[in-house]
């Protein structure tokens, strides 16, 4: 066959018969996309991998447990030939040619009439990469190009501004605990599209430095609030910028709804009729202990973890935390915003039955270059915090999980 370039096309397979010969690794890799395309899939194979078998069990594909037989491709629009028997593959290929069925061959790309591109998806777009002709086929290279394009679109380093529908209104984006790599893909994309970013002190501050110069970055702590409460001033700033037609990102540390006042902002936006998108984030309550080698649960050690705020002391009438009940739990206690009050908290837990020897770890500025972990017990934590000069932000973990990792204090 002359070396003409392959002609790229998108097949619309909804309800159309696709025959897959062979139920091994190739089928396992290709079937999910065929299922997603709505194809009517017939798998012909004496055996299948457990994953392929599961697709048959759930009815996503029809599986005939037998070897290929001439005539199998008669009703097909498209075929994937991937058996481990080269003779069967060649015979099926010849049948496909006879019936004018486009077919992919896993064992011999030269003999195939179609090639599967390296594909990826981003925001309603499918990126498909093919080598131009058989001689230049290099699946790793095409996959690498696909990855670069999809990754670039997702993280905003590859921007296609003229064709992108920007998310209107305000996006409340959970930025994760601080490491810029720990924001979600969606969060990062929305940041890349923003005109205005209103950011907290906590969270991935490094990402702000990457924003192009036209993006207005506002430090939420510095919004003047005059006769308003600070939170009201932030809400007003979000509303005002959105009303000017700007794409606004409210970048918050961790997850917007874990002690993040995210719902207050979402409510204020709803009252003002401004569309609001919420993007979850990785909460420091789980990720910061994890980054310091502490799992919040561990088999045989803790079957529960409870996340509480320690921003008011246990005897403060504004506290909504039931500390006496928490003292009776056997699982892990994760305390946010608790550095200042940890002495009173530890006393209260011990007074209500927790052992003074219960391990405690404080993880300061987790996931950042400045991360540090300080270990103590409920009996010693108050003096340790002072002696070691532990400062917020820190996540405090109380419970036996503190000792299970390789770094655990004994
Ligand atoms: C107002 S709360 C916000 C929590 C955030 N929404 C989340 O899901 O992680 C702030 C507290 O979270 C904890 N925190 C957030 N980021 C942290 C980090 N990188 N290292 C340690 N603690 C952190 C600290 O306890 C801090 O006082």
Image (cartoon, rainbow, N blue to C red):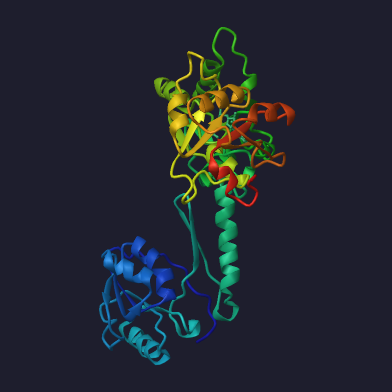
The residue furthest bottom is 87
| Position above or below: 380 against 82 | above
Is residue 180 among what the camera can see?
yes
Figure quadrant, ligand 1: top right
Q: Position of residue 264 (x, y in %)?
A: 46, 23
Is 88 situated left or right of 240 in this image? left
Q: Disc count in the image?
A: 0
Q: Residue 135 lies in what quarter of the image?
A: bottom right
Query: Where residue 7 sits: x, y (%)?
Result: 47, 72
Residue closest to the eye, 361 or 23: 361
Q: Quarter-wise, where is residue 395 in the image? A: top right
Q: Position of residue 255 (x, y in %)?
A: 51, 35
Q: Residue at x 62, y 14 (%)?
A: 224
Residue 170: x percent and y percent? Answer: 49, 30
Residue 168 in the figure: left or right of residue 378 = left
| Residue 63 location, quadrant | bottom left
Image height of 30 relative to 22, above or below? above
Q: In this orientation, which residue lies closer to the viewer: 155 or 135?
A: 155
Asked if 196 appears above or below 38 in the picture, the reply is: above
User: Is 68 or 124 nearer to us in this picture?
Assistant: 68
Residue at image point 58% right, 45% down: 294
Query: Can I make out residue 249 in this image?
Result: no
In the image, taking residue 206 as reference, residue 296 lies left or right, namely: left
């Amino acid at each position: 066959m002359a070396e003409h370039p392959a002609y790229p096309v998108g097949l619309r397979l909804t309800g159309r018969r696709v025959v897959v010969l062979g139920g091994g690794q190739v089928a396992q890799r290709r079937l999910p996309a065929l299922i997603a395309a709505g194809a009517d899939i017939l798998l012909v194979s004496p055996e299948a991998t457990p994953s392929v078998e599961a697709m048959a069990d759930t009815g996503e594909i029809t599986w005939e447990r037998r070897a290929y037989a001439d005539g199998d491709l008669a009703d097909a629009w498209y075929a994937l030939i991937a058996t481990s028997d080269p003779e069967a593959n060649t015979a099926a290929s010849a049948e496909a040619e006879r019936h004018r069925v486009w077919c992919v061959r896993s064992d011999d790309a030269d003999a195939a009439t179609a090639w599967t591109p390296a594909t990826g998806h981003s925001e309603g777009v499918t990126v498909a990469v093919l080598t131009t002709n058989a001689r230049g086929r290099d699946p790793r290279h095409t996959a690498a190009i696909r990855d670069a394009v999809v990754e670039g679109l997702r993280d905003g380093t590859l921007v296609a501004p003229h064709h992108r529908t920007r998310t209107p209104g305000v996006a409340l984006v959970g930025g994760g605990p601080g490491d810029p790599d720990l924001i979600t893909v969606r969060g990062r994309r929305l940041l890349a599209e923003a005109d205005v970013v209103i950011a907290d002190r906590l969270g991935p501050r490094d990402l702000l430095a990457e924003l192009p110069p036209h993006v207005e970055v506002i430090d939420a702590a510095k919004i003047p609030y005059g006769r308003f409460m600070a939170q009201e001033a932030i809400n007003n700033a979000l509303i005002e910028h959105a009303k000017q037609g700007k794409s606004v990102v409210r970048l918050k540390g961790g997850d917007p709804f874990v002690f993040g006042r995210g719902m207050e902002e979402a409510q204020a936006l709803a009252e003002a009729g401004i569309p609001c998108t919420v993007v979850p984030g990785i909460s420091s309550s789980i990720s910061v202990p994890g980054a310091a080698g502490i799992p919040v649960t561990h088999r045989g050690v803790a079957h529960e973890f409870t996340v509480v705020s320690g921003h008011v002391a246990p005897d403060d009438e504004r506290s909504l935390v039931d500390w006496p009940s928490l003292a009776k739990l056997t699982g892990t206690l994760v305390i946010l915003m608790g550095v200042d009050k940890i002495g009173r908290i530890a006393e209260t837990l011990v007074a209500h039955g927790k052992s003074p020897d219960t391990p405690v770890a404080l993880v300061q500025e987790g996931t950042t270059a400045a991360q540090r972990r300080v270990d103590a017990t409920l009996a010693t934590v108050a003096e340790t915090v002072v002696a070691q000069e532990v400062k917020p932000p820190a996540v405090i973990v109380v419970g036996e999980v503190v000792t299970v990792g390789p770094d655990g204090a004994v």
